[in-house]
Image: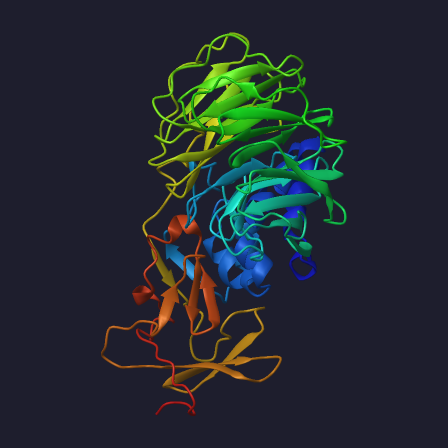
């Protein structure tokens, strides 16, 4: 039902809420099992109802009560004879995408992450580390920044295509047309605390304010910077906006009038790349290409103490923790550092793991985790207290791998409950769509040969496709083990061939 209604993503949050409130241990465990199943197989469940049975159940953790019941209820489908997991995977250290990640931000509920890359916004489940799919493409260039409304219902994105877009965070659908008044690349977007406004910075050297409901620009651009605006941030009370620029300065603006507040904040010796308000609104942290972070008094515009030194290259991103006690910073050498916001001293050693630029760092709303996005095409999750990467899946939980469909034999239905059926003679299997009667594929036995599924391909998104048809979906963690040359269609079938445009092969 949730797949048909397009409510798969929302169901994950609902299940987590239910689990957190439940007192009965057995019911709590059951809800957690369902949540893990949906999160692990978000892609097939949300994109194709039949593949709940074709793709999700066969690859599920064998120790799951839900999977055990489902395999018993739907036996005539794919079966994974090797390569399955005994338990649901623990949260992985690395979330692997297919493009560099220029933006990373937690949902306000802390349970999901949104990342921006080349024309796309990717969503991830924090607890399982599973990809939750991409939003429909709405940008024509790299997504540089993402911001959520405080209630989590809407999302704003900025892009090098010079536009902003507004999204329904629940459905992933875009609201209206792109916001187009900037004359160069959009580098940063920020929702106001009341959710009514959005601020954006651009390489056209300006800041713009937008009505979050209508998408209309408020008044004229905010002018004052002499070079690219790289970062914008609303103060927690919504009264002011901070902006950082390639002109080496930070500026403060009155959110209501768009007027500059005080003089530019000067002190950095190179471009300012990122600005972040402290939760109490009294301070601003800024990162720069001069390898330092600086803290500023919002009311006076004065620098607080000496620059925070420790990075060995450009500082690309800074973020205050929700309690204001820590600052996280990312660097173009691939490291993240944690700082004591009160003393300006580094906390422990640099967080190492990325192999390329760290473009964005973000604290979870509860302050317990840090997410970092990098040009190395990964997102990493860190324990904010210890600086340690979050745990990996236990190494002994995986078997070696092979895939079969041993119910796909003469006189058996192809996939139970999938909307497909098969008919056969001694030499062929014919798959038909039960609703339309349209032939999907003929498979022919080739005696005496080593067999494979001809023309099947494994896409980056996990789908195994034959032409435009979805054959089955493979979890990302198993893709390196799956070899369709080993696809089996029962003990008597070692190779399968499609015959297009003809009747059954002879």
Given residues 415 and 210, the one toward you in this image is: 210
Please provide percent x and percent y for residue 389.
42, 28
Q: Is residue 380 above or below residue 434?
A: above
- Residue 368 in sight from this viewpoint: no
Q: In the shown orientation, is residue 161 left or right of residue 429?
A: right
Q: Quadrant of residue 208?
A: top right
Q: In the shown orientation, is residue 264 left or right of residue 55?
A: right
x 58%, y 41%: residue? 146
Q: Give the colouring mode of the picture.
A: rainbow
Which quarter of the rendered picture does the N terminus lie within?
A: bottom right
Please provide percent x and percent y for residue 224.
60, 31
Which quarter of the rendered picture does the C terminus lie within?
A: bottom left
Q: Quadrant of residue 190?
A: top right
- Residue 474 in sight from this viewpoint: yes
Given residues 99 and 478, the one toward you in this image is: 99
x 48%, y 24%: residue? 287
For the image, the number of numbered tags is: 0
Please provide percent x and percent y for residue 388.
42, 23
Please provide percent x and percent y for residue 394.
39, 35
Given residues 78 and 455, the one toward you in this image is: 455
Q: In the shown orientation, is residue 195 left or right of residue 317?
A: right
């Amino acid at each position: 039902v949730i797949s048909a209604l397009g409510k798969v993503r929302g169901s994950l949050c609902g299940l987590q809420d239910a689990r957190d409130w439940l007192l009965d241990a057995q019911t709590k465990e059951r809800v957690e099992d369902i949540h893990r199943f949906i999160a692990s197989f978000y892609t097939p469940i949300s994109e194709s109802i039949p593949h709940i049975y074709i793709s999700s159940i066969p690859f599920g953790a064998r120790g799951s009560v839900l999977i055990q019941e489902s395999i018993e209820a739907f036996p005539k489908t794919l079966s994974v004879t090797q390569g399955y997991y005994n338990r649901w995977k623990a949260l992985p250290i690395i979330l692997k995408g297919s493009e560099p990640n220029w933006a990373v931000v937690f949902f306000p509920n802390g349970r999901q992450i949104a990342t921006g890359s080349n024309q796309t916004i990717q969503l991830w489940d924090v607890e399982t580390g599973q990809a939750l799919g991409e939003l429909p493409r709405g940008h024509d260039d790299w997504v540089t920044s993402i911001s959520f409304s405080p209630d989590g219902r809407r999302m704003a994105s900025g892009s090098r295509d010079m536009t902003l877009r507004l999204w329904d965070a629940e459905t992933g659908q875009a609201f209206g047309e792109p916001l187009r008044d900037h004359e160069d690349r959009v580098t940063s977007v920020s929702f106001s605390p009341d959710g009514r406004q959005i601020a954006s910075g651009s390489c056209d050297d300006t800041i713009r304010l937008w009505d979050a409901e209508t998408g209309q620009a408020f008044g004229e651009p905010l002018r004052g910077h002499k070079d690219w605006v790289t970062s914008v941030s609303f103060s927690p009370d919504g009264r002011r906006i901070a902006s950082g620029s390639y002109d080496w300065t930070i500026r403060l603006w009155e959110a209501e009038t768009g007027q500059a507040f005080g003089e530019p904040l000067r002190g950095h010796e190179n471009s300012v790349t990122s600005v972040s308000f402290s939760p109490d609104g009294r301070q601003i942290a800024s990162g720069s290409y001069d390898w330092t972070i600086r803290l500023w008094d919002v009311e006076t515009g004065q620098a607080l103490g000496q620059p925070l030194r420790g990075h060995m290259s450009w500082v690309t991103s800074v973020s205050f923790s929700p309690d204001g006690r820590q600052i996280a910073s990312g660097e173009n050498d691939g490291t993240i550092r944690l700082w004591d916001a009160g003393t300006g001293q580094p906390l422990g050693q640099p967080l190492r793991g990325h192999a390329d630029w760290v473009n964005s760092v973000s604290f979870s709303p509860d302050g317990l985790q840090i997410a970092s996005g990098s040009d190395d095409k990964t997102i990493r999750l860190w324990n904010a207290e210890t600086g340690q990467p979050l745990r990996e899946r236990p190494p002994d939980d995986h078997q070696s791998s092979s895939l079969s469909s041993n119910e796909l034999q003469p006189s058996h239905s192809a996939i139970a409950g999938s909307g497909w059926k098969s008919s056969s003679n001694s030499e062929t299997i014919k798959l038909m769509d039960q609703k339309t009667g349209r032939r999907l594929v003929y498979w022919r036995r080739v005696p005496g040969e080593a067999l494979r599924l001809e023309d099947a391909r494994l896409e980056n998104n996990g789908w195994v496709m034959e032409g435009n048809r979805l054959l089955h979906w493979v979890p990302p963690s198993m893709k390196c083990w799956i070899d369709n040359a080993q696809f089996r269609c029962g003990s008597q079938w070692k190779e399968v061939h499609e015959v297009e445009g003809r009747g059954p092969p002879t």
